[in-house]
């Protein structure tokens, strides 16, 4: 089966100046260093100037000279940087899993409506439990963030399972993508109808949530989000070999003795948890899940999931941190909607990168 | 009732777009039958004389910038400069009933002609309701966009009597209902709607009320005169406005004498973004006139600034008073919503105030309804909470202190 948009199994390596193994190690190291640097930059800079020595002191558990600095670093910058890192990694790995699962280069949580499914879950909780008192996030806390994450994951899984079910009959990758987009818009429409019956201020808060933000999470949220995302990432890492086999086609995977169904289910579960948790806390975020796997494949020169998954985690975290920085330019007070940044800056970067890259064949149109 | 009365206009615009997909309900056969006033033709001209001035009471517009009134002998011209954000000016020719329709040329040739006083009015925003109740003209109200957010007991009673049709229950205007009932006029909520041209084609006058685009509190309140031009209650409206203006001035003058303005922190955070009234906004003006100030009071614009919490905390975290807009039962609710609120001085000192004291039975907030006509009461509340020592015994109309917990 070779449709124009299908991800190709790994082709025999062309002779390269750098040996593949060393290249992969170099890419992973560079990404790790870059992510660490951006993380530091996100924590060290912001609207208000906090001396670097004081930032370090707070990070080491001390109290800054100005008590405000402690709050800024501890309660504002650190949660934001951790959220961006975790969500970037989560969306990137969810993207990798979906692209392999669908054998489709354009699959990602956003394009196939999984984020919309997650939004539907969140909307159901928010609109359904809407009392007069309290605020949007207050209710989330009331029911437990866990409940919302669960609802978002169930919504994500429902859409994903439906698209996957249809993918058994639909062989064309493009058709499947269109179906995914349609299911996504149906989910969005359901949200729209739910909002009509929501109290105006709740509907408004839901819309604000939909703009996407890394700045909304606080420590109690992180205590839920980090373990959930961690578990999802671990699951993905453990199933790397299974994903490699799926990349070769189901029949081939079966001959290798792989339980194809279980592999699919595991990838489905992992993607739902990752996309669900990311969406529940930060709103639906465009671009990251689609772009990061491609950029990473090109950089690595391979579609081998044993390298692709860890490298995508780092690349996702790196790009998410970059977007977080751009959405709140240091030295200014303002906030730009995160999705505007991810799309505006992300899309051209990806297009340029893909067109320029001669090795773009790997995992993209052949 | 209307989306645009959210405290955050920019977000409301987003929401309007988001809700553009809403369903239009089918015509409801059980809708209350035409509740048009059957009053005799009171206020109409008998034996028209072209030389007589039929407008003995002429309203003067002093504060409002977004509408003008021009009087001729038997008709007047109401012009709304910006009927909805970025909209082109619209003029309406209000012809005293019993007078012949004027033959107009130029810009007014195509203007809608409306016979006044109107007998039936559909209202798109709850902000119009006090303009009717406070001038004794509620009997012209025959339609509202949505019943749910009405807070005025008087209006709710009229609704329960079945005299008011709900024409945009699910936020989308049911054009069939409106055309079927043929109200004399539909007053807009100051935003555009694709149904309005259709209603005009069907012979229903659509008059814009864009009071929310006025940056000054008294300017907003003065729209009572635009309403009065339709209902014929000019005299009552003028008296009412003069009182409001005098009371507002009195408090503002008292506030101007305080030695140092009180630092306040206005606004609320949604998903980590703090929505702060811009320096040229209605809220900013009220804070200034009440003897308060805040770090962004100098920053221009009339909408909201979207700020990150770091900036808000660094510049305004130590303000002794926080003016929020959420319906928290206690400060613990605020901290539960976002634990970073707990770092604000006003929260630890229990000086959190919200404009949610007067809520209607359906969840509507009188601050956004009656408060628009009564900025004097809003200002008196703000002055009292900023300078409690100078306003002992003040009874709050809209603001309440969130209990510390």
Image: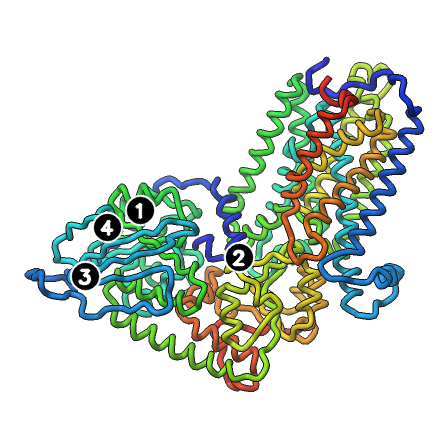
- Observer-side mark, 1 or 3, equals 3
- Observer-side mark, 1 or 2, equals 2
Check disc 3: other Cα within 10 Å, few if <14, some if 14-19, many if 20+: few
Residue A8, relative to residue B41: is it above or below?
A: above
Specify the subunit that label 1 lies on: B
Instruction: Give the image location of residue B283, x and y in percent.
Output: 51, 66
Instruction: Give the image location of residue B21, x and y in percent.
Output: 48, 40
Marks 1 and 4, how far apart in space? 26 Å
Instruction: Give the image location of residue A131, x and y in percent.
Output: 57, 57
Taking the image as shown, residue A278 lies to the left or right of residue A302, namely left
Q: How many marks?
A: 4
Instruction: Give the image location of residue A335, x and y in percent.
Output: 65, 53
According to the image, label 4 marks what residue?
B108
- Observer-side mark, 1 or 4, equals 4
According to the image, label 3 marks what residue?
B72
According to the image, label 1 marks what residue?
B178
> Residue at the spot x=31%, y=41% of the render?
B198
CB under 8 Å between discs 3 and 4: no
| Quarter of the rendering containing residue B50 | bottom left
Check if mark 1 and mark 2 are on a common chain: yes
According to the image, label 2 marks what residue?
B8
Taking the image as shown, residue A12 lies to the left or right of residue B353, namely right
Specify the subunit that label 3 lies on: B
């Amino acid at each position: 089966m070779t449709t124009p948009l299908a991800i190709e199994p790994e082709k025999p390596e062309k002779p390269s100046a750098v040996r593949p193994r060393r290249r992969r190690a170099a890419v992973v190291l560079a990404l790790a260093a870059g992510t660490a640097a951006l993380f530091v930059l996100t924590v060290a800079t912001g609207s208000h100037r906090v001396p670097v020595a004081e930032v370090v002191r707070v990070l080491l558990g001390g109290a800054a000279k100005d008590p405000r600095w402690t709050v800024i670093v501890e309660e504002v910058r650190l949660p934001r940087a951790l959220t961006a890192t975790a969500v970037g990694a989560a969306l990137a790995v969810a993207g990798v899993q979906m692209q392999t699962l669908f054998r489709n280069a354009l699959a990602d949580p956003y394009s196939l409506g999984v984020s919309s499914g997650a939004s539907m879950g969140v909307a159901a909780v928010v609109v359904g439990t809407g009392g007069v008192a309290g605020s949007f996030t207050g209710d989330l806390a009331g029911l437990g963030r866990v409940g919302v994450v669960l609802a978002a994951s169930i919504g994500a899984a429902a859409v994903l399972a439906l698209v996957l079910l249809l993918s058994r009959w639909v062989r064309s990758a493009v058709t499947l993508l269109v179906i995914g987009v349609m299911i996504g818009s149906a989910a969005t429409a359901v949200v729209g109808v739910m909002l009509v019956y929501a109290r105006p201020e709740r509907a408004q808060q839901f819309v604000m949530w939909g703009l996407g933000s890394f700045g909304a999470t606080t420590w109690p949220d992180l205590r839920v989000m980090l373990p959930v995302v961690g578990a999802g990432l671990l699951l993905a890492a453990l199933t790397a070999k299974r994903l490699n086999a799926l990349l070769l086609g189901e029949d081939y995977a079966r001959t290798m003795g792989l339980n194809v169904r279980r592999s699919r289910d595991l990838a489905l579960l992992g993607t739902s948890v990752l996309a669900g948790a990311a969406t529940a806390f930060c709103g639906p975020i465009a671009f990251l899940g689609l772009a990061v796997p491609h950029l990473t494949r090109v950089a690595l020169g391979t579609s081998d999931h044993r390298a692709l998954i860890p490298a995508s985690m780092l690349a996702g975290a790196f790009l998410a941190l970059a977007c977080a920085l751009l959405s709140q330019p240091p030295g200014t007070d303002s906030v730009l909607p995160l999705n505007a940044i991810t799309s505006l800056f992300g899309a051209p970067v990806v297009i340029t990168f893909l067109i320029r890259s001669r090795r773009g064949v790997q995992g993209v149109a052949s | 009732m209307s989306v645009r009365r959210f405290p955050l206009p920019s977000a409301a615009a987003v929401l309007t777009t988001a809700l553009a997909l809403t369903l239009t309900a089918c015509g409801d056969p059980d809708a209350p039958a035409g509740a048009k006033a059957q009053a005799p033709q009171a206020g109409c001209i008998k034996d028209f004389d072209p030389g007589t001035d039929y407008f003995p009471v002429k309203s003067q517009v002093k504060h409002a910038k977004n509408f003008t009134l021009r009087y001729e002998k038997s008709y007047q011209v109401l012009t709304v400069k910006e009927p909805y954000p970025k909209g082109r000016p619209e003029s309406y020719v209000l012809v005293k009933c019993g007078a012949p329709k004027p033959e107009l040329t130029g810009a007014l040739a195509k203007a809608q002609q409306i016979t006044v006083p109107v007998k039936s009015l559909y209202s798109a925003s709850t902000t119009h309701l006090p303009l009717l109740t406070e001038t004794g003209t509620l009997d012209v109200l025959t339609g509202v966009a949505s019943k749910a957010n009405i807070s005025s007991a008087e209006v709710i009673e009229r609704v329960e009597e079945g005299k008011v049709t709900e024409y945009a229950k699910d936020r989308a205007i049911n054009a069939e209902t409106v055309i079927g009932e043929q109200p004399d006029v539909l007053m807009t909520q100051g935003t555009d709607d694709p149904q309005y041209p259709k209603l005009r084609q069907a012979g229903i006058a659509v008059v814009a009320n864009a009071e929310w685009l006025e940056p000054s509190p008294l300017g907003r309140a003065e729209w009572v005169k635009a309403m009065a031009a339709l209902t014929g209650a000019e005299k009552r409206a003028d008296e009412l406005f003069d009182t409001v203006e005098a009371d507002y001035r009195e408090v503002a003058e008292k506030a101007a004498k305080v030695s140092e303005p009180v630092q306040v922190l206005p606004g609320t955070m949604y998903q980590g973004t703090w929505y702060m009234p811009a320096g040229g906004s209605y809220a900013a003006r009220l804070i200034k006139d009440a003897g308060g100030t805040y770090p962004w009071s100098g920053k221009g614009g009339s909408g909201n600034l979207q700020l990150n919490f770091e900036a808000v905390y660094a510049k305004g975290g130590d303000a002794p008073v926080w003016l929020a807009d959420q319906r928290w039962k206690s400060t613990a609710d605020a901290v539960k919503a976002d634990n970073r609120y707990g770092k604000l001085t006003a929260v630890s000192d229990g000086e959190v105030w919200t404009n949610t004291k007067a809520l209607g039975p359906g969840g509507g907030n009188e601050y956004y309804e009656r408060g628009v006509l009564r900025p004097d009461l809003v200002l008196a509340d703000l002055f009292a909470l900023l300078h409690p020592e100078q306003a002992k015994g003040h009874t709050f109309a809209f603001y309440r202190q969130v209990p510390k917990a």
